Amino acid sequence: MKLVICGKGGSGKSTIAALLAKATVKTGNSVLVIDTDESNFGLHRQLGVELPQDFMNYLGGKDVALEKIMAAAPDYESVSFFDKEWQIADIPSKYYSEKNGIKLIAIGKIHEVGEGCACTMGMVAKEFIGNLNLNSNEVVLVDTEAGIEHFGRAVEKGVDAIIMVIDPSYESMKLSEKVLELSSSIEKPVYYVLNKVDATNEQFMMESISNQDMIIAAIPANTALSVAGLKGNEIMADDSGIENMNQFLMENLRK
Ligand SMILES: Nc1ncnc2c1ncn2[C@@H]1O[C@H](COP(=O)(O)OP(=O)(O)OP(=O)(O)O)[C@@H](O)[C@H]1O
Ligand SMILES: [Mg+2]
């Protein structure tokens, strides 16, 4: 099962990815978290691991990947970075961090001023995710950068479903309509996770979303989570909303 997690900036994508990873290993699965957000410096802390070496280096670095893309212009679809299908076990150990059944890889961090746009890493991430062959007990969670640019790079094409995190804001609610439209256009199911809710805004959000079956969890605003987010501490999946969400995904998307 491969899932991509998307949403507005600060809605809680990385937090939900980390919580879901932890809930998923509790049920006896192993998880690969793929960090495709070039400006994400909190996810590895939430998972309690070091930031791994950039997976771009496996390909010789961002420059080498970019040269490959430019050489193929204008037939960008023909570009291929990998010569075989991958399994999680094939990822060299220097490119992942691991703790308690969760592996984390990072594709395409910005390291220096003027490195250029994130298109290269989007193309690498898309092919890597699409090429990944999973065993039945393996789950891939892709944490994305804010907004919907990754849809433009078709990172979503290789996944089984899209999880959108919606925080209590007008922007998030509007973005949820756009994400549904984009996901439908590539025939991928989308599920909503309401995050940072309280009793008042949860009810309003529920009523505003026309297809309520798409809502698979409502995670309360939680002081422990926000303090951990502030301090860069590891977080734990002890929230029943996440356990239920994990159960739903396992039952409905398992192949
Ligand atoms: N349910 C919650 N209750 C309280 N705080 C939360 C909750 N979910 C996330 N947060 C906090 O909100 C902040 C943003 O969360 P997070 O970094 O996961 O968002 P994001 O969508 O990944 O952000 P970005 O767009 O920067 O990648 C963090 O400080 C996090 O601790
Ligand atoms: Mg994030």
Image (tube, rainbow, N blue to C red):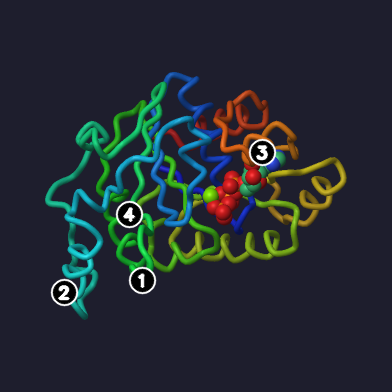
Dot in front, 1 or 4: 1
Position of the C terminus by quadrant: top left
Dot in front, 3 or 1: 1
Q: Amino acid at mark 1?
A: Gly
The tag earlier along the polypeptide, 2 or 3, is 2
The reply to whether the C-beta atoms of the residues labelled 3 and 4 are less than 8 Å apart is no
Marks 4/2: CA distance?
A: 18 Å
Dot in front, 3 or 4: 4
The residue at which mark 1 appears reads as 114
Q: Residue at x 31, y 36 (%)?
A: 96
- Residue 188: percent from left, percent from top: 46, 54
SS label for mark 1: loop
220 up-or-down from 172: above or below: above
Name the disc covering residue 217, or none: 3
- Residue 164: percent from left, percent from top: 58, 51
The tag earlier along the polypeptide, 4 or 2, is 2
The residue at which mark 2 appears reads as 72
57 up-or-down from 183: above or below: above
Q: Amino acid at mark 2?
A: Ala
The tag earlier along the polypeptide, 2 or 1, is 2
The reply to whether the C-beta atoms of the residues labelled 1 and 4 are less than 8 Å apart is no
- Residue 230: percent from left, percent from top: 64, 41
The residue at which mark 4 appears reads as 125
The reply to whether the C-beta atoms of the residues labelled 3 and 1 are less than 8 Å apart is no
Horizontal side of residue 121 vs 149, given as left or right: left
Marks 1/4: CA distance?
A: 21 Å
The answer to whether residue 1 shows anywhere in this view is: no
Q: Residue at x 40, y 31 (%)?
A: 31
The tag earlier along the polypeptide, 3 or 1, is 1
